[in-house]
Image (cartoon, helix red, strand yellow):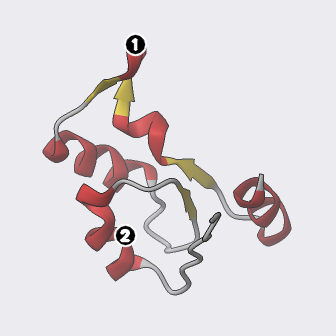
Amino acid sequence: MLSLELGRRLQVPVVHLDQLRFRSGWQSVETAELLGHEQRALPRDGRWIADGNNGATMETRLAAADTIIFLDLA
């Protein structure tokens, strides 16, 4: 997985957004709760990789990121 390899090479934590977005049984959390999960999970020093695509909270991550990689799998 690209995110794990980048995290290993850059020595930064990788946060898997689906683990924050869903409870057991793939029950989705509300957006406000998800924002709280992300704020707690993403290190404040700005050195992190977020793996996934949660559109509802993307604006917050885009504002905090210095590099963004979008994969076009088509």
Q: Amino acid at mark 2?
A: Arg
Q: Who's the residue at 64% across and 56% down the image? A: 13
Q: Amino acid at mark 1?
A: Gly
Query: Most extreme residue toward the top, as rendered?
Result: 25
* Figure check: 45 above or below 14: below
Residue corresponding to mark 2: 61
Left/right of residue 5 with respect to residue 70 in the rendered view:
right
Left/right of residue 1 with respect to residue 67 in the rendered view:
right
Residue 62 - label: none
Quadrant in the picture for residue 28:
top left
Left/right of residue 41 with respect to residue 3 in the rendered view:
left
Q: Tag 2 or tag 1, which sits nearer the N-term?
A: 1
Quadrant location, the C terminus: bottom right
Q: Position of residue 50 (x, y in %)?
A: 53, 59
Q: Residues within 10 Å of mark 1 (few under 14, many from 20)?
A: few
Q: Who's the residue at 32% across and 55% down the image? A: 39
Left/right of residue 58 with respect to residue 19 in the rendered view:
left
The foreground one among 73 and 51 is 73
Q: Secondary structure at mark 2?
A: helix
* Figure check: 46 above or below 22: below
Residue corresponding to mark 1: 25
Asked if labels 2 and 1 touch by Cβ distance under 8 angstroms, the answer is no
Q: Residues within 10 Å of mark 2 (few under 14, many from 20)?
A: some
Query: Most extreme residue toward the bottom, as rendered?
Result: 66
Q: Secondary structure at mark 1?
A: helix
Q: Who's the residue at 33% across and 81% down the image? A: 63
CA gap, disc 1 and disc 2: 26 Å
